[in-house]
Image: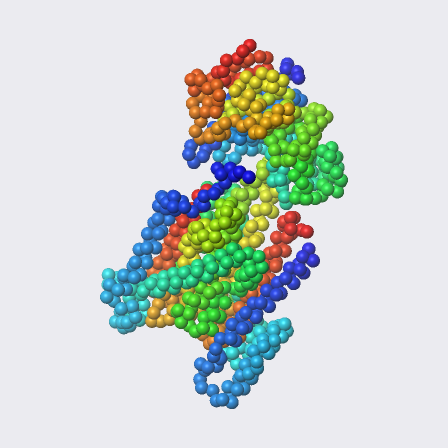
């Protein structure tokens, strides 16, 4: 049999040229690029502000309680006289740390679980996906709270707990993607011509998963930010005097007369979440132009 | 065919344009043709020739970004620019259309009975019972076995060929004067295709209607049509009777199309194709759109090309010399 | 229909059993017992406590007894409020506990679903209008920003700044007290419903069978309400299953913001007091509701899509 090579997509789409064109499409998307810039700036500020401000985030200052925003305290102060500007960014730092770490674990577990299920297939796949189905039946937040109560209310453990049950979507997506890649003509052609499994996975499967994984990672980070913030509302996760955006917002929600206590952390969080949303959208469009 | 009678449908300088991201695409460019009573006229061309868009335009079914210019008269009534309300009185009643893809052209969420009776209830003011009887009779006519019971099924319970029969039956319920058939057999396999063509010919005789038959298949044209319009890149290339087209295909594109019909007598290894790609409507050459693929291209081709009358009822748009 | 429903319910029983088993063993395998942290108990008191909570039995016996209780409709005894059956706390005779959460969720669904569908359909029919753009952008905003941010902001605007409504509390479940919490939930879920409806109706109207309906000369109203309505609603309905679980959790978060006496308070108390039995009960209750709602959605789907009938 003679293949009409021209009509057969022998070349995997994920080549160097592919990534270059993805990047050029992304860089032309102003909204996504601005969002990316905001994310980077906020991340940098979360690192830098607490170090160089020279103001302690946790020292009670009875002389400066509940000041509205002014030249000394740009975001005002809280009920213990602590500077909200510094607290907002130290809270942001913790929030980002939790979110990025949790997102990393989510990706790792999700990719492995999904790729194994998709690549091995058969009974293994059925059983693995049945487990995912069952876990989907559990309301996420309650399960999180259960895990945190069980393993103790420490930050490290809480994000492990969060990550441990957030990988379901990721695994489904990766499995689906792996299955479809496995049946692409160029992969089947590689299999038929005796290319080793290892080489197929590294040359074809992983590069093609990368696009989906990147987009999903950009969506997972904000999800993790929200989840850790919600947990603060239940008094779980980060504890005083350390703080996080969730804790600051829940604190602000209890001191409504001091509007700045709510508005600044809420504003920072909204900006961050929207930036991630726009950036993820831009990434998806760049990776999958219609 | 009685030429003294005014044509049932007459299109003049029809232009269909689409607004797209990269500018304006002209899918149909100054098309004129006539359809007389009880004739089958073929419109032939590759994809992108504008044949389907012409028909959608005169049915008022263009996509939202499409615009029609020129004139189409049906029974003396101007269709271009007609209000949807007025158009709704005509389409489905006097002009009916069947589509290329029978698998997706019937509503999968409604029973056949419901989809068929609504036409009669709307256009003929029939009560449901009577409309149902009529619909069953029509299904019998298009040879759907056990129509009485099967009319209460959903489309997905029919095969592709059967669905196209249902589509045909549905379009003929109101005894339209004009049936537009947009590649009705393309999605079907060859034996079913032949059956559907036979069926259309029979029904045309019986109901005394005109059919516009859109296809890219010259073989199908030879089988069913009285006259044929050949289109390319939005242009009308050649109009002739079926005999003239097969005896004296003057236009290089027409003759190229004819050569693509597989011939049983000559045993060939390879199917003939027209070299080159179908036209990209965003980047058409100056003058004749067929130039890049034409075997008889000349400098004159990039200028104005008039429509020439070569013989009675034989018109062509080409610069090529014609031996009289 | 009935056969399908029964089959669907039977299929979900093993799922529920698996969830209960998972939750039970997670709780009971974790080292330490819930009374470790309490003020020093005399050995006798501890022993009687352990016996009361069956913690002295082998784990498999505890598991079977828990299942037995569950089948008889009981979630066991609270570990914080000693001796109190959890059922009494979850489902109190007067308003409170689950009833508050359920009421919030139902109000939200009843308003958000039709409102979202109507907005989405209108937006889809008037693509690129200002209303369409509003639907698209509010979907982006409200999927990104959760109730725990929008909730306090609503309180700040409506209750604190303009003093229009009470900032929190249940009152006697009157409109004034429920307005803000329900508004926050509706804001959170309507845009998604509208966005999905919008995409769906745009797809449907571009479909070949709608083209056929137009070619038949049917008036627009008939095309929309007879031909387009079912396929437009199908994706919306499959969205509602997971969304209900979301609304339930969203309601719990909203209760925290507005200090409503629902599952939220029970969850917080249980979490801070390490009342395992209570959290287990809430988690399992949530799972049951999720599963039940998915069954309802599947049945609705079946009614609307003739292709799944057999």
Dividing the image into 4 quarters, which one contains the C terminus of chain B?
Answer: top right
Percent of width and height locating residue B241:
61, 18
Q: Nearer the viewer, residue A68 or A75?
A: A75
Residue A67 at x, y percent in the picture: 28, 66
Which quadrant of the figure has residue B142?
A: top right
Nearest the camera: C119 or B320? B320
Q: What count of labels does the image hold? A: 0
Asked whether residue C182 is in view, the answer is no
**Vertical arrangement, residue B65 with respect to residue A174, above or below:** above
**Rendered view: B103 above or below C39:** above
Expressed as whole percent of the image width and height from the top left, the position of residue A172 reads: 51, 56
Instruction: Please say which color scheme the image uses.
Output: rainbow
The residue sitting at 69% across, 31% down in the picture is B195
Instruction: Determine the residue positioned at 59% across, 27% down.
Output: B268
Q: Is residue B108 above or below residue B167?
A: below
Q: Would you place residue C169 above or below residue C35 in this image? A: above
Q: Nearer the viewer, residue B251 or B39?
A: B251
């Amino acid at each position: 049999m003679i293949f009409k090579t021209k009509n057969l997509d022998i070349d995997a789409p994920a080549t160097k040229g592919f990534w270059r064109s993805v990047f050029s499409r992304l860089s032309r998307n102003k909204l996504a690029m601005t969002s990316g810039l905001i994310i980077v700036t906020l991340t940098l500020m979360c690192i830098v502000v607490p170090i160089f401000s020279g103001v302690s985030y946790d020292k009670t200052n009875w002389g400066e309680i509940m000041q509205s925003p002014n030249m000394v305290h740009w975001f005002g102060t809280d009920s213990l006289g602590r500077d909200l500007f510094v607290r907002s960014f130290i809270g942001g730092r913790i929030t980002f740390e939790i979110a990025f770490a949790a997102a990393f674990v989510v990706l790792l577990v999700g990719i492995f679980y999904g790729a194994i299920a998709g690549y091995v297939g058969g009974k293994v796949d059925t059983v693995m996906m049945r487990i995912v189905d069952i876990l989907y039946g559990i309301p996420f937040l309650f399960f999180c709270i259960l895990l945190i109560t069980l393993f103790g209310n420490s930050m490290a453990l809480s994000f492990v707990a969060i990550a441990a049950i957030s990988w379901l979507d990721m695994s489904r997506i990766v499995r689906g993607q792996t299955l479809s890649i496995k049946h692409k003509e160029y992969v089947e052609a590689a299999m038929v011509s005796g290319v080793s499994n290892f080489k197929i996975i590294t040359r074809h499967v992983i590069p093609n998963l990368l696009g989906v994984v990147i987009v999903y990672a950009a969506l997972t980070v904000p999800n993790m930010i929200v989840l850790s913030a919600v947990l603060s509302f239940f008094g779980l996760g980060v504890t005083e005097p350390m703080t996080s955006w969730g804790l600051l917002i829940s604190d602000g929600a209890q001191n409504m007369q001091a509007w700045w206590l709510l508005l600044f952390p809420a504003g920072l969080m909204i900006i961050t979440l929207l930036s991630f949303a726009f950036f993820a959208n831009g990434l998806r469009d760049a990776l999958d132009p219609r | 065919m009685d030429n003294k009678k005014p044509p049932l449908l007459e299109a003049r300088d029809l232009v269909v344009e689409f607004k797209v991201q990269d500018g304006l695409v002209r899918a149909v460019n100054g098309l004129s043709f006539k359809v007389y009573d009880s004739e089958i006229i073929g419109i032939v061309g590759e994809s992108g020739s504008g044949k389907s868009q012409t028909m959608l335009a005169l049915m008022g079914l263009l996509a939202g970004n499409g615009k029609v210019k020129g004139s189409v008269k049906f029974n003396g009534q101007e269709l271009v620019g007609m209000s949807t309300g007025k158009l709704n009185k005509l389409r489905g009643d006097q002009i009916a259309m069947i589509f290329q893809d029978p698998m997706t052209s019937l509503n999968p969420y409604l029973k056949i009975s419901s989809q068929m009776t609504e036409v009669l209830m709307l256009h003929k003011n029939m009560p449901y019972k009577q409309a149902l009887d009529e619909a069953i009779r029509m299904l019998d006519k298009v040879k759907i076995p056990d129509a009485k019971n099967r009319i209460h099924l959903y489309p997905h319970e029919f095969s592709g060929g059967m669905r196209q029969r249902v589509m045909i039956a549905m379009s003929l319920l109101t005894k339209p004067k004009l049936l537009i058939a947009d590649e009705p057999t393309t999605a079907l396999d060859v034996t079913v295709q032949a059956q559907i063509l036979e069926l259309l010919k029979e029904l045309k005789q019986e109901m005394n209607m005109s059919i516009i038959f859109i296809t890219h298949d010259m073989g199908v044209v030879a089988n069913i049509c009285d006259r044929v319009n050949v289109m390319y890149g939005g242009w009308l290339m050649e109009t002739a009777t079926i005999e003239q087209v097969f005896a004296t295909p003057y236009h290089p594109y027409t003759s190229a199309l004819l050569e693509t019909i597989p011939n049983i007598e000559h045993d060939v290894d390879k199917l003939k194709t027209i070299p080159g790609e179908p036209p990209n409507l965003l980047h058409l050459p100056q003058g004749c759109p067929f130039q890049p693929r034409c075997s008889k291209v000349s400098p004159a081709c990039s200028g104005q090309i008039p429509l020439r009358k070569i013989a009675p009822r034989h018109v062509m748009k080409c610069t090529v010399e014609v031996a009289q | 229909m009935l056969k399908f429903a029964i089959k669907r319910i039977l299929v979900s029983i093993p799922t529920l059993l698996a969830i209960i088993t998972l939750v039970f063993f997670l709780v009971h395998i974790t080292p330490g017992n819930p009374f470790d942290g309490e003020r020093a108990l005399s050995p006798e008191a501890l022993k009687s406590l352990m016996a009361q909570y069956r913690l002295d039995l082998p784990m498999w016996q505890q598991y079977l007894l828990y299942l037995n209780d569950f089948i008889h409709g009981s979630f066991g005894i609270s570990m914080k409020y000693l001796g109190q059956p959890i059922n009494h706390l979850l489902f109190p005779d007067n308003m409170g506990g689950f009833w508050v959460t359920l009421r919030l969720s139902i109000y939200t669904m009843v308003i958000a679903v039709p409102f979202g569908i109507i907005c989405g359909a209108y937006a889809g029919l008037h693509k690129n209008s200002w209303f369409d753009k509003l639907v698209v952008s509010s979907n982006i905003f409200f999927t990104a920003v959760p109730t725990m941010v929008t909730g306090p902001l609503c309180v700040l605007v409506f209750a604190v700044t303009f003093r229009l409504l009470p900032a929190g509390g249940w009152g006697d479940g009157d409109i004034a007290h429920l307005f803000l919490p329900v508004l926050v939930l509706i804001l959170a879920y309507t845009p998604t419903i509208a966005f999905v409806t919008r995409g769906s109706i745009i797809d449907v109207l571009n479909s070949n069978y709608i083209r056929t309906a137009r070619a038949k000369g049917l008036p627009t109203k008939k095309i929309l309400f007879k031909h387009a309505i079912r396929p437009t609603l199908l994706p919306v309905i499959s969205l509602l299953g997971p969304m209900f679980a979301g609304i339930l959790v969203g309601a719990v978060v909203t209760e925290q913001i507005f200090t409503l006496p629902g599952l939220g308070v029970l969850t917080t108390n249980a979490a801070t007091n390490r009342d395992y039995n209570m959290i287990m009960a809430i988690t399992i209750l949530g799972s049951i509701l999720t599963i039940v709602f998915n069954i309802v959605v599947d049945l609705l789907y079946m009614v609307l899509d003739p292709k799944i009938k057999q």
